[in-house]
Image: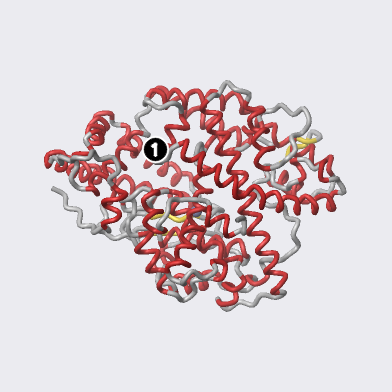
Amino acid sequence: MLCFRLVIPAALAVGYLVVCRPAIVCASPDVTDRAARFVKDHETRLRPLEVAAALAWWNANTSGKDEDFDKKVAAQNAIDAALADSKVFAQIKELKDKRGDIDDPIAARCVDVIYLTYLEKQVDAEVLKKMVELSNKVEKAFNVFRAKVDGKEMTDSEVRKVLKDSNDSARRQAVWEASKKVGEVLDGDLRALVKLRNQAAVKLGFKNYHALQLYLNEQDGDQLLKLFDELDELTREPFRKAKADIDERLEKLYGIPVAKLMPWHYHDPFFQETPSVFTVDLDKPFEKADLLAMSRKFYDGIGLPIDRVITASDLYEKKGKSPHAFCTDIDREGDVRVLANIQNNEQWMGTMLHELGHSVYSSKNIPRSVPYVVRGEAHILTTEGVAMQFERFSKSRPWIEKMGLKVPNATQFDEAAKKVQRNQLLIFSRWCQVMLRFEKGMYENPQRDLNKLWWDLVEKYQGLHRPEGRNAPDYCSKVHICSAPVDYHNYMMGQLFASQVHHAICRDIYNGADPNSVIYIGDKRVGEFMKKKVFEPGRTVDWRGLTRYATGEDLTPKAFAADFKAN
Ligand SMILES: [Zn+2]
């Protein structure tokens, strides 16, 4: 029998891990043994495939070579094929049904996690094939689509440039409308895809695809809406004020009264980011800084050294390499790498803090005694949260100065940095309201008037004016609705987690100090807290359990709102 030697705190084991046990538990040694054997067996089969896939992913993104991309696809297909096996699924389902009889909470948790992994791949082969074909078609159409204005094609970055820089309102409108035409191209395919996704979900016993995706993510639609209602309540007024300030600036900039400002005046095609109407140079302090050395010094100082990560990483621009940034745990044995393209500006300082935040929340700091299948972050929202918690320091003057950099025009920097940070988070939170509610509405009732639903939500949560008489499938112009469904809300919840953990650190380590003044530098207690309270449980707990364990409370928007003086 497999022996899990992980010592988990009693509160975790009793209070949070085992939630569905009957009052009288008759644990069965037989079921416990079978569960342990199954977990071990699963690990033996999947581990080599997962390590190979992680390496292939890394190679493809660092080299950009076709043959590496082919290997990446092949490695993923091998994993999918293993997880689609219906006989193995029947075994794990049986164990899942007898979960209450499993005497070891960690083994029971492994069963939960493995069950979800297989469930996702149990879609009928024919339906799956059609879904893959359609998603590929949609993705391709997105990539080749070009907005056409006055007979001329424009790339996505040309569209964004006009929306950012042009003072010609008519031109803005023409470009914005042309960029939304992709929605009309994709509408039919997306509707077909939604139908297929719903069919697949119903076959697996779920109401619709949205409900299935949330279940796979250990989330619940009604609870999620409650959380987002609370967030709406807390951000509505601060957002209204922030937007009024932005509107006033846009009014001056374009000579258009606020009441006549339209979606194409807000720089970003979806108003998911703050328009660049604040004149301040946040990049100045970082112009000559060594961002890598700073990151190393910071993480080392708080007791979470990253030397090995840096050695294994690929951090500067080169030909063929992915232009983005990500962090990946290759083997869950400590081989953790970051891909980045460092430039000397504030955005890359934030990105480095973010990616390296992911890197410390990995098998580097989750003990080997945690079984392989749960030796990772508790949830996407918790690792994004940790990354965001550290990322925020790139806009903090006390942090920048204590790290040894000079900030010219300190007062001006402070004011602008605070405003940009605040606006970004508020604007993002309102945009996430639209995404969550739209997707839920669409999968629950795909026959309804989706064009109207989209604009109703945009008006309500983002405060934008619906262009008069507009009746077009504008939701289809957001690529995530098509290719990364039911995922957006996790980034918002990550922000809530980031604030809540930071507040817990201020309460538990800094005697309740003002969260805006706490910058962690050189304080090893912060690393200790993160290791003990956030990293070490890995996925032996779900995100709810981890949030309660780390902060003493359920996930709420209270700390997030307090950060922006919304209360
Ligand atoms: Zn991230």
In the rendered image of this protein, does residue 458 appear above or below residue 565?
above
Front residue of 428/122: it is 428
Q: x, y (%) of residue 494?
A: 49, 51
**SS class, disc 1:** helix
| Residue density around tag 1, few if under 14, some if 14–19, many if 20 or more, within 10 Å | some
The residue wearing badge 1 is 216
Q: Tell whether 335 sits left or right of 261.
A: left
What quarter of the picture does the C terminus occupy? bottom right
Instruction: Tell me where residue 108 sits by quadrant.
Output: top left
Q: x, y (%) of residue 214?
A: 44, 37
Whether the residue carrying mark 1 lies under 8 Å from ligand 1 is answered with: no
Residue occupying image coordinates x 44% and y 53%:
382
Q: Tell whether 525 sits left or right of 27.
A: right
**Farthest right residue?**
255
In the rendered image of this protein, does residue 198 appear above or below residue 350?
above
Residue occupying image coordinates x 63% and y 65%:
345
Q: Tell whether 392 sits left or right of 474.
A: left
Question: How many numbered callouts?
Answer: 1
Residue occupying image coordinates x 44% and y 35%:
213
Residue 23 in view (yes/no):
yes
Front residue of 243/451: it is 243
Front residue of 391/235: it is 235
Q: x, y (%) of residue 500?
A: 48, 57
Instruction: Tell me where residue 99 sits by quadrant.
Output: top left
In the rendered image of this protein, does residue 240 appear above or below residue 519?
above
Q: How is the image coloured?
A: secondary structure
Q: Check disc 1 and give the amino acid type.
A: Leu
Q: x, y (%) of residue 506?
A: 48, 67
Residue 62 in view (yes/no):
no
Residue occupying image coordinates x 57% and y 78%:
404
In the rendered image of this protein, does residue 523 appear above or below residue 113?
below
Instruction: Tell me where residue 9 sits by quadrant.
Output: bottom left
